[in-house]
Image (cartoon, grey):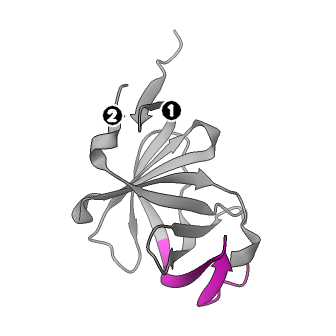
Amino acid sequence: MLPLKKFISINNEMHEILGKAIYTSKNNPDSEYIKIFLEGHKTILIVPSEDIAFFGDDKGRIAEFDNFSEKTVYNDKVMKLVNHDFQIEKRVEFGKTEGECEYWDYEGDDKTIFVSVAVLADGTRSDVELHEINFDDVKDLV
């Protein structure tokens, strides 16, 4: 029997869920966050302790962040490094996840954009451009 596909609706748009994991970080081990990996290289990042969620696209490697500098310009916005840490995978709920990695988080001056730049265990990049979303716009349809 084939496993059932899982779906989620974000802003009334359906997305197939490929994987879900709970993470923490080396510098902040008591704080957990959830990543839900979707078809089409999309990701949801949820930080329950801050009651905040982000939705965005995994761009692979974004060249503007190659130097991991304190500031860079991306899509005509000045982006500042706000966090550099190591992701620790606490629990895989199901499916495909990215595992443990080193990451750099950048935020735009106007706080409308957030880019998480990650170097995965195999050396590839997973740079995700994220935008804050309202929890009311997310519906778990399983």
| x then y, percent, for residue 61 | 73, 64
Residue at screen point 59% across, 90% down: 70
Q: Is residue 123 magenta?
A: no
Q: Observer-nearest residue: 125 or 70?
A: 70
Circles 2 and 1 in contact, beta carbons < 8 Å: no
Farthest residue, direction top: 1
Q: Amino acid at mark 1?
A: His
User: Is 114 located above or below residue 67 in the figure?
Assistant: above
- The residue tagged with tag 1: helix, strand or loop? strand
| x then y, percent, for residue 118 | 60, 68
Q: Residues within 10 Å of mark 1 (few under 14, many from 20)?
A: some
- The residue tagged with tag 2: helix, strand or loop? strand
Q: Is residue 70 magenta?
A: yes
Q: Is residue 14 left or right of residue 57?
A: left
Check residue 137 in the rendering and tell me which mark sits there, or answer none.
none
Residue at screen point 35% across, 59% down: 33
Residue at screen point 71% across, 61% down: 122
**Image quadrant containing the C terminus:** top left
The dominant secondary structure in magenta is: strand
Q: Earlier in the sequence, mark 2 or mark 1?
A: 1
Q: Amino acid at mark 2?
A: Lys
- Give how far apart the Cα atoms at labels 2 and 1 are: 10 Å
How many labels sit on residues? 2
| x then y, percent, for residue 27 | 38, 81
Residue under numbered circle 1: 15
Farthest residue, direction bottom: 70
- Point out the stretch of residues depicted in magenta: 66-86
Residue under numbered circle 2: 139
Residue at screen point 35% across, 26% down: 141
| x then y, percent, for residue 121 | 64, 64
Q: Is residue 73 left or right of residue 55?
A: right
User: Is 112 located above or below residue 104 in the figure?
Assistant: above
